[in-house]
Image (cartoon, rainbow, N blue to C red):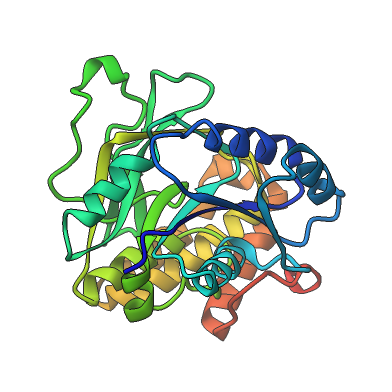
Amino acid sequence: MSNLIYAIVLNWNNAPDTIECIESLKKTGSIDFKILCVDNGSEDKSCGKIREAHPDIEFLETGANLGYAGGNNAGIKYAMEKGAGYFWILNNDTVADANALKPMIESLKGDSTAGAAGSVIMRYDNKHIIWFAGGIYDRKRGYTSHYLENRSIEEVKPATVPEKFDFVSGASFVVTRKAIEKTGYLDSGLFLFYEEIDYCFRLNKAGFKYLMCPGSIVYHKVSASLGDDSPLKLYYYTRNRLYISKKYFPRYFTLVLLWCIRWPLLPSFVKKRKRIPYVLAAFRDFFAGRRGALNERKKT
């Protein structure tokens, strides 16, 4: 397998974060790799700003917003045509530590059964606080949580990662060409959220391991793209939560469905009425088998 590595950074209407992310990648000097910025149909002229700030990297424009999976798939396909053997998928709202890449590549080269390796993710706004050190999927609720989330790095051993975990973070992980050729690309039908969970489950089914690399540190601006209170985020989260449960753990689907129904009935939720049409749209589209991007005109 080729040793060529591509770092793929997906931009959508967010030049400042993307520029800062790419700047951090250029300081990752312990291992050679190429940087590809994929512009995912931005409408704010951010692509031109990024080109001006970083004229020495490679660019790809999708021409439309293909979502997290679709945009990254476009980047992976581009890099595969260039002969890459490793693909570092990195959120544009992250800043990489100078040694972030090397531990992941070394782990993958040291284990022929591994198809992907992920970083430990720290909060950008408080770089001592862990945001992700391994993902946990609750099969009975369809809910995800992060190992050691909100714990101070000083409280735990730097090398601490769980022995068993369900997924790596989509904010920073490396996947091998071998894994992609056997498992396929990210599921573009999800569009946003749960893509890395789906991919890790598919890797496992195909016989690949996915690893956590405590020596790989990346700092994440949590929810920089949509915000914590975004109704659109709620739509994708609810729809895809149901989809993943039905696809991989159908025996628990009824329980997950009940949790998804109960959630919008909470008083704290009902007060924010703008959310309600998006939740209803999530249920409607899931049961209708509609995937991909939400058609805003049909959310009610």
In the displayed structure, would residue 8 be above or below residue 26? below
Of all residues shown, which one is farthest toward the left? 163
- Measured along the vertical axis of the image, is residue 216 above or below residue 150? below
Residue 265 visible, this orientation: no
Q: Nearer the viewer, residue 233 or 20?
A: 20
Q: Residue at x 18, y 32 (%)?
A: 160
225 shown above or below 251: above
Q: Quadrant of residue 19?
A: top right
Residue 225 image point, x, y percent:
65, 44
Q: Position of residue 136 (x, y in %)?
A: 27, 50
Q: Where is residue 212 shown, x and y percent of the image?
A: 26, 46
Residue at the spot 79% in from the left edge and 50% down from the top edge: 47
Q: Quadrant of residue 4?
A: bottom left
**4 lies left or right of 231:** left
Q: Nearer the viewer, residue 300 or 198?
A: 198
- Quadrant of the frame with the N terminus: bottom left
Q: Quadrant of the C terminus?
A: bottom right
Give the camera-side residue of 23 and 193. Answer: 23
